[in-house]
Image: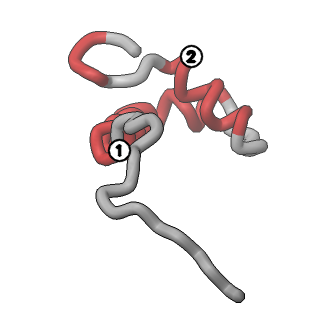
């Protein structure tokens, strides 16, 4: 990621390619500020990786 959390044009192109979306270079250049700020907000709102969390209360399922 480039400075200040704003994705670069290459990172945006990779995101669109991963999503299976074709965006022309002209359209990318015209809408780069919108696309990059939207992706930056999405990345900020994403939950951090928590890993494995042990439950606070043990659970015993007895279905007999």
Q: Quadrant of residue 47?
A: top left
Count how many numbered circles sit on residues in the image. 2
Q: What residue lies at 50% left-to-right and 28% top-to-bottom?
A: 29
13 relative to 2, above or below: below
- Residue at the far front in the pictured view: 64
Q: What residue lies at 38% left-to-right and 38% top-to-bottom?
A: 50
Residue 14 tag number: none
At which x and y percent is residue 1?
40, 15
Q: Is residue 31 visible?
A: no
Circle 2 — which element?
A: helix
Q: Quadrant of residue 6?
A: top left
- Between 19 and 57, the one lying in front of the other is 57
13 relative to 30, above or below: above
Quadrant where the C terminus is found in the figure = bottom right
User: Residue tagged by mark 1?
Assistant: 47
- Between 31 and 5, the one lying in front of the other is 5
- Between 56 and 5, the one lying in front of the other is 56
Q: Quadrant of residue 19?
A: top right
1 relative to 50, above or below: above
- Residue at the far top in the pictured view: 3
Q: CA distance from mark 1 to mark 2?
A: 24 Å
Q: What residue lies at 59% left-to-right and 75% top-to-bottom?
A: 61
41 relative to 18, above or below: below
User: Residue tagged by mark 2?
Assistant: 10
Circle 1 — which element?
A: loop
């Amino acid at each position: 990621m480039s400075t200040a959390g704003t994705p670069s044009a290459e990172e945006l192109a990779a995101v669109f390619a991963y999503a299976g979306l074709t965006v022309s270079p002209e359209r990318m250049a015209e809408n780069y500020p919108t696309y990059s700020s939207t992706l930056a907000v999405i990345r900020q709102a994403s939950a951090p990786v928590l890993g494995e969390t042990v439950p606070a209360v043990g659970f015993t399922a007895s279905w007999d």
